[in-house]
């Protein structure tokens, strides 16, 4: 599987995972009614992903609102990124958060610690 695209809604994020273009992102709101069902295709995509050692995988996560169930799902995604890193793939996680939302920054810091991945934290103005 080389590409997974899920269009975002008012309660679910846009997900773009494309090995052809090298673009990997999760953006928007994440509080789906059925979190497990929504994120299952993402977990499946990672199960099928084959990247050679030395390749780069950069994931941007830019969530404006995230439910506690979605945090569990995002953590699973980050575990998959960690598996890539452990296999020799160069990984980078960019955690973009609203410059006025310290809680979102703290969530990113916690996820970085739990996953063992190094995050780049970028404060943005989500209103622009």
Image (cartoon, rainbow, N blue to C red):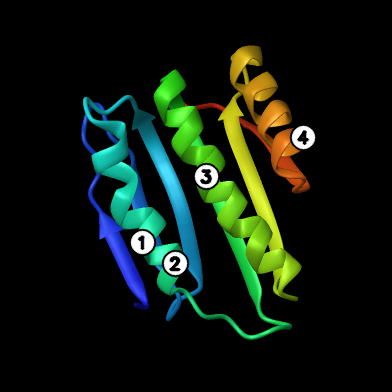
Q: Nearer the viewer, mark 4 or mark 1?
A: 1
Residue 127 appears in the figure = no
Sequence-first tag of 3 and 2: 2
Q: Quadrant of the N terminus?
A: bottom left
| Disc 2 element | helix
Q: State the residue in front, 108 or 101.
A: 108
| Disc 3 element | helix
Q: Position of residue 62 (x, y in %)?
A: 50, 38
Mark 2 closeness class: few <14, some 14–19, many ≥20 residues within 10 Å = few
Q: CA distance from mark 4 to mark 1?
A: 24 Å
Residue occupied by mark 1: 44
Say if 68 sits above or below 85 in the image.
Answer: above
Q: Do the residues under discs 4 and 3 have CB atoms within 8 angstroms?
A: no
Say if 103 sits above or below 26 in the image.
Answer: above
Sequence-first tag of 4 and 1: 1
Q: State the residue in front, 102 or 30.
A: 30
Q: Do the residues under discs 2 and 1 have CB atoms within 8 angstroms?
A: yes
Residue occupied by mark 4: 113
Q: State the residue in front, 118 or 115.
A: 115
Q: Position of residue 38 (x, y in %)?
A: 26, 42
Say if 44 sits above or below 121 in the image.
Answer: below
Q: Position of residue 6 (x, y in %)?
A: 25, 53
Mark 3 closeness class: few <14, some 14–19, many ≥20 residues within 10 Å = some
**Toward which corner of the image does residue 70 lie, by quadrant?**
top left
Residue occupied by mark 3: 76
Residue 11 appears in the figure = yes
Tell me which residue sits at (67%, 57%) in the image.
82
């Amino acid at each position: 599987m080389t590409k997974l695209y899920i269009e975002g809604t008012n309660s679910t994020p846009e997900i773009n995972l494309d090995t052809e273009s090298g673009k990997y992102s999760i953006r928007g709101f994440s509080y789906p009614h059925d979190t497990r069902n929504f994120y299952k295709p993402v977990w499946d995509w990672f199960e099928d992903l084959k990247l050679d050692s030395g390749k780069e995988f950069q994931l941007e996560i830019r969530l404006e609102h995230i439910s506690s169930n979605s945090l569990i799902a995002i953590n699973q995604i980050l575990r998959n990124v960690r598996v890539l890193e452990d296999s020799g793939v160069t990984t980078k996680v960019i955690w973009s958060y609203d410059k006025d939302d310290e809680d979102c920054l703290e969530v990113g810091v916690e996820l970085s610690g739990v996953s063992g991945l190094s995050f780049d934290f970028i404060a943005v103005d989500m209103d622009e």
